[in-house]
Image (cartoon, rainbow, N blue to C red):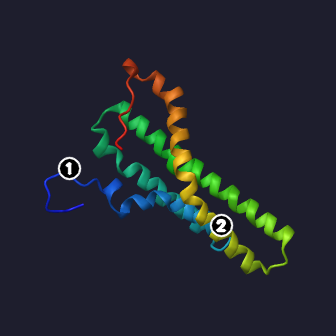
Amino acid sequence: MDPSSDSAPVDIYRDTWVRFLGYANEVGEAFRALVPVSAVWASYAVATAYAHSGESGKAVCVTVAVVDTFVWQALASVCIPGFTINRVCAACHFLLSRTTRWPLPVRKWTTTAIGLSTIPFIITPIDRSVDLLLDSTLRKVYPGGEKHAKEE
C-alpha cells in the first residue's frame, strides 16, 4: 500500500503486522511442549488483547457490532484455534511417543513444527465456520435482523 496515496486509511488491525498478534495463542499452543505453561497462557493474553483492541474504533458505540465483534473474535481468534492446535499437538506428541524411538527433545520439536505448520490450514475453515455459526444463531436475534457488516 502506497502511503502517499489518498485511498482508504490503513487499518492497523488488518493491514499491518499487528494482525499477526491474533495468532499468538496458536503459536503458544504449538510451543506448549517446549515452554512453561505460563508462556502458553501469556500467548492467550496477547491474542485476547488483540481480539478486543479493535472493537471500540470499529464498532462506533453500536452495541450489536460490539457484541458481534467480541463473540466472533473470541471464537475465531482465541477459543477454537487454540483448542485445535492444542489437540493437534497432543495427538502428534502421543503418536510420536508410541510409534518412534526418537529422543524426547526431537519429539517435542517435531510436535511444535507440526503445530506451527497447521496454523495456516485452520484459519479459513474456522473463520467460515464461526460465520456460519453466528449467522444461524446470534445474528438472527439482532434487532431488525441486522447483520454485523464484515470488512473484507
Front-most of residues 69 and 14: 14
Instruction: Name the kind of residue labelled 2 in the image.
Output: Ile
Residue 152 in the image: above or below residue 21: above
Residue 107 in the image: above or below residue 47: below
Image quadrant where residue 56 sits: top left
Which residue is rendered at x = 46% and y = 22% of the image? Answer: 141
Secondary structure of residue under mark 1: loop
Q: Position of residue 22 (x, y in %)?
A: 46, 56
Asked if labels 2 and 1 touch by Cβ distance under 8 angstroms, the answer is no
Task: Judge from the rendering whether residue 5 lies leftward or rightward of residue 143; answer left or right.
Answer: left
Image quadrant where residue 121 sits: bottom right
Task: Judge from the rendering whether residue 121 lies leftward or rightward of residue 54; answer left or right.
Answer: right
Q: Which residue is mark 1?
A: 8
Q: Residues within 10 Å of mark 1 (few under 14, many from 20)?
A: few
Instruction: Name the kind of residue labelled 1 in the image.
Output: Ala
Residue 39: tell me if it is visible: yes
Q: Residues within 10 Å of mark 2 (few under 14, many from 20)?
A: some
Q: Which mark is residue 114?
A: 2
Secondary structure of residue under mark 2: helix
Residue 141 in the image: above or below residue 74: above
Q: Position of residue 120 (x, y in %)?
A: 54, 58
How many numbered badges does the structure rendering display?
A: 2
